[in-house]
Amino acid sequence: MGAWGAVGRVTVSLNGDWRIADSVGAMEMPAAYDRVVPVPGLANLAVPPFAKVDMFDGREWIQSAVRDKKLPESALVQTAGVSLQARNYFWYRRSFRVTEKKPLAMLRIAKAQFGTAVWLNGQKMGEHLGCFSAGFFDVTGAVKWDAENELVVRIGAHPAALPVWAPAGTDFEKNKWTAGIYDNVSLILTGLPYMESVQVAPRLAAGAAEVETALWNPGATVVRARLSQAQKETGGAAGVEVVLQPGERKSVRQMVAMKGAKLWTPEAPNLYWVETAVGGDTVRTRFGMREFRFDTATKRAYLNGQLYFLRGSNITLHRFFEDPLCKRHPWEEAWVRKLLVDGPKKMHWNSFRFCIGPVPEMWFDIADEAGLLIQNEFFIWNGRTYFPPYRGEELITQYTEWMRDHWNHPSVAIWDATNETDSALLRETVIPAVRKLDLSDRPWDNGYAVPMGPNDPVEDHPYLFSALMRPEGKFEMTQLEGMTGAKTTNAGHPSGHAVIANEYGWLWLNRDGSPTVLTEKVYERLLGKDATPAARFELYAYNLAGMTEFWRAHRNFAGVLHFTWLTCSYPGVKTSDHWKNVETLELEPQFADWMVEAFRPLGVYINFWQPRLQAGAKRTYAVMMVNDEGRAVEGKLRLEFVGGGAAAEIPFAMAAYGAHTYQLGVDAPASVGQYILRATAQVAGRASTVSRRKVEVTR
């Protein structure tokens, strides 16, 4: 939600070690809690460990297994899936004391799965079905202000613990489903009226920020108070008198001048705080002055009114949750900062899709500070032919909560309703109901559905190498020479909207260099059964970099995001990432070498993929260049055969956001052998950009 405690509001963190136990029945509260588990964290971190803690076959995983003839059709289920563990619930317990009595006490559980119920001092405080958004519980009537309090939280042990009409996450490629309170838990102590949320929306044209404060008076008497907003650095302020009847909720909008405020961009992630006060409640909310949109006429993205090209990757954190090396890393700030800040800067990335499952709120705070544009995806992936029996009103509730938790983060640039899915319920009911709640009016991606808004984008997943999974399927990199990089009909079709290529490749390797389930046949056809891990890593990095250059060079996509930066890797997974050591975040060297060049803002692509040339052959090569920056650049473009042979060099000049193709003639080497055809773009005072092709010179 982007709000932190200040004068008038006391926020008590309840993070730390909790006790944990399990049960089969929903009301079988354990008599003893004989294990310890971290909060935030997952139940598979409990000590001593639980048996089969995350064993659950999801409905979509079963559908895939039936399609692949690994299970009979009789295995199909209409429920969330089939549990393979001897429990349905986990129970968390801890005690705490409060040092200051306030009129209202609210328990906030930022994220827990699967479903949450709360008891305080033996009294049930309520339930929350959402797995991807914060649950709030009014615990005022049960708090002991001058004694020890016992808090018990029950969560489902697997997705089937929730009603079939409530989303618990869907993923065709996820093998394990791990329960846990996986985000912060806090106790909010405050006066009345209570600020349920504060939303800050930049208004760049007006040089201001619009602040919407949602107020609630849970008391028995009328509350009269002044609602004020203050921004220290710019001196902006606003105030208005409010009156709330007992039990009344109301939202109030105010404009706060932001004179001289610096804009937020990935290159300069400037952040501000607005202080909101009303009665006995005070909140500080962090935000950035930035606006982000797509434009259908140009098929481009615009940041603060300027053309902006997205370069980046994906993170599938809920798949990483099932990785044996996940451990506590997602909640270690130093590890997350290295993942989101250090690595992306080296790779020249400015964006991520948080894909198929949400991340803890700390990740968004870091993304704000790092300057990352996030495509924030709700955890639904069901394809085009089947959609679970979710209730529309429940989806509206959960999407609303999910937006509320994230709408103050300048890093959140795109709401992503679903992955690779076309649902009439989402398209016609849910998105129209909730998008108006976002005062920043962010664009919406809706999986493989046609866009909802006139300037909404669509996602495309041009997995060219997937054709090699079929014996009759064909794809070679030489085909790129005659292709234009246009979107496929995987994307919402028909549509002429802006497109983001946020998945491509289909060459995944496990961290040990072995193919994944989805790429075994691909590598067998490309390299044979006996290929070494080193040979596979080299082929993967070489082709992935080439495709990245290709998609960028043809300028048919507003963004190019590779799949994927972080996921799980162990025998039996379908995708993987690029870490040599995921715990220290050491990249596989071939990936680091080839991909760092493919994503430089000044992009270079040699439109040549022939594996062989005749010695001395005369040829003209097309070298495509793109400039992602809002300033013109000029320099030298050199094309040469490394290791011998001729070279050509010409000056180049690229306009801001420009693209151009240069023709350079270079004779092939006279001697046979293995060579690298290399194009180098050099701008004075900057690191060069290199595009490389492997070529065998023959007689």
Image (cartoon, helix red, strand yellow):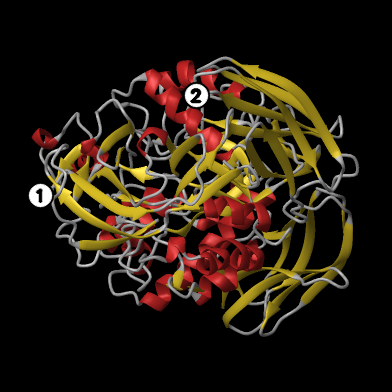
Q: Specify few, some or many for label 1: CA neighbours under 10 Å numbering under 14, 14-19, or 20 or more.
A: some
Q: Residue at x 32, y 26 (%)?
A: 387
User: Residue 166 has which mark?
Assistant: none
* Quarter of the picture holding the N terminus: top right
Three-letter amino acid code at disc 2?
Pro
| Quadrant into which the C terminus falls | bottom right
Disc tally is 2
| Residue with the mark numbered 2 | 218
Name the residue located 48 percent from the left edge and 26 percent from the top edge.
449
Q: Residue at x 47, y 50 (%)?
A: 359
Q: Position of residue 239 (x, y in %)?
A: 79, 27
**Quadrant of the rendered structure where residue 322 is?**
bottom left
Left/right placement of residue 8 relative to residue 538 reads right
Mark 2 surroundings within 10 Å by alpha-carbon count, few (fewer than 14), some (14 through 19), many (20 or more) = many
Residue 640: horizontal and vertical position, in percent? 73, 75
Up the image or down, 365 lies above or below 397; here it is below
The image quarter containing residue 71 is top left
Residue positioned most to the front: 146
- The amino acid type found where label 1 is placed reads Ala
Using the image, tell me which numbered label, if any, was put on residue 86: 1
Where 547 sits versus 397, above or below? Answer: below
Q: Decide which of 122, 148 is in the foreground and name it.
A: 148
Instruction: Report whether 120 appears left or right of 652.
Output: left
First in residue order: circle 1 vs circle 2:
1
- Helix, strand or loop under label 2: loop
* Residue 450 seen from this side: yes
Query: At numbered mark 1, what does the secondary structure look like: helix, strand or loop?
Result: loop
Q: Position of residue 394 (x, y in %)?
A: 38, 23
